[in-house]
Amino acid sequence: RKEVEQDPGPFNVPEGATVAFNCTYSNSASQSFFWYRQDCRKEPKLLMSVYSSGNEDGRFTAQLNRASQYISLLIRDSKLSDSATYLCVVNMEYGNKLVFGAGTILRVKS
Amino acid sequence: GAGVSQSPRYKVAKRGQDVALRCDPISGHVSLFWYQQALGQGPEFLTYFQNEAQLDKSGLPSDRFFAERPEGSVSTLKIQRTQQEDSAVYLCASSLSRTGDQPQHFGDGTRLSIL
């Protein structure tokens, strides 16, 4: 079983739609969680950290469910510019090491 | 700029050649990481430095891979006797954090192609 698993997609949605991605992680002692965004042939960029109480940044909402060991990302009012690969990232218990999921592809179409 | 800088941006080498990839982290960032990203996959951890100390090299795929950060700033990832399966994008990231609670900032990567 992979340490961080994501549905690879692609998710094809129209502009203005709401879309949600889930991610599961294997290590129950994981401490830090992030969503990164990666555009084609570009480097990953931090989208948002994920906090235990859930957090929101504009159109983006992240949730953490420690009991079920999953993380979610909700995007409201999708824009064409949201098209990218979204990487779920977990800092495992053992040291300063991030483990990335393989990514979920989002395509927003007009 | 103030971001993580990697060079070269692209590298083509023949199988069996040695290559060296450079990373210049954000000034003042204690932690530096190297990742390997294959097409269609997320980045895979290779190794981690805290200042000049290499604290984790568990992700290096073989003894042909070697990384150093002698003065706690610039880092070099060296691959000896390259093979075709080494073809990938090599990403460097740096972070202020020693404990992983802060995000990592990535460079543009070096796209390595082994012929």
Image (tube, coloured by chain):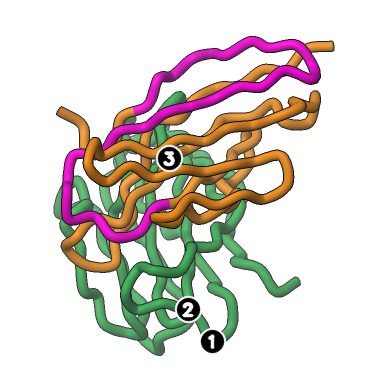
Chain colours: A orange, B green
Element under label 3? strand
**Mark number for residue B96?**
2
10 Å neighbourhood of mark 2: few (<14), some, or many (≥20)?
some
Q: Please provide the residue range marked out in magenta.
A: A6-33
Camera-side residue of B1 and B81 = B1
Q: Quadrant location of residue A16? A: top right
Residue type at the position of mark 1: Gly
Residue type at the position of mark 3: Cys
Tags 3 and 2 touching, CB below 8 Å: no
Q: Quadrant location of residue A106? A: top right
Above/below status of A81 relative to B78: above
Q: Position of residue B57 (x, y in %)?
A: 20, 62
Tags 2 and 1 touching, CB below 8 Å: yes
Chain containing mark 3: A
Residue that appears at 73% across and 47% down = A58
- Mark 2–mark 1 Cα distance, whole angstroms, equals 7 Å
Chain containing mark 1: B
Query: Magenta span has A25?
Result: yes
**Mark number for residue A88?**
3
Which quarter of the rendering shows the C terminus of chain A? Answer: top right
- Tell which residue pokes out farthest to the front in this image: A53
Chain containing mark 2: B
The residue identified by callout 1 is B28
Above/below status of B15 relative to B78: above
Q: Position of residue A107 (x, y in %)?
A: 67, 17
Q: In front: mark 2 or mark 1? A: 2
Residue that appears at 33% across and 42% down = A65
Q: In front: mark 1 or mark 3? A: 3
- Residue B9 shown left or right of residue B83 in the figure: right
- Mark 3–mark 2 Cα distance, whole angstroms, equals 21 Å
Q: Is residue B115 visible?
A: no
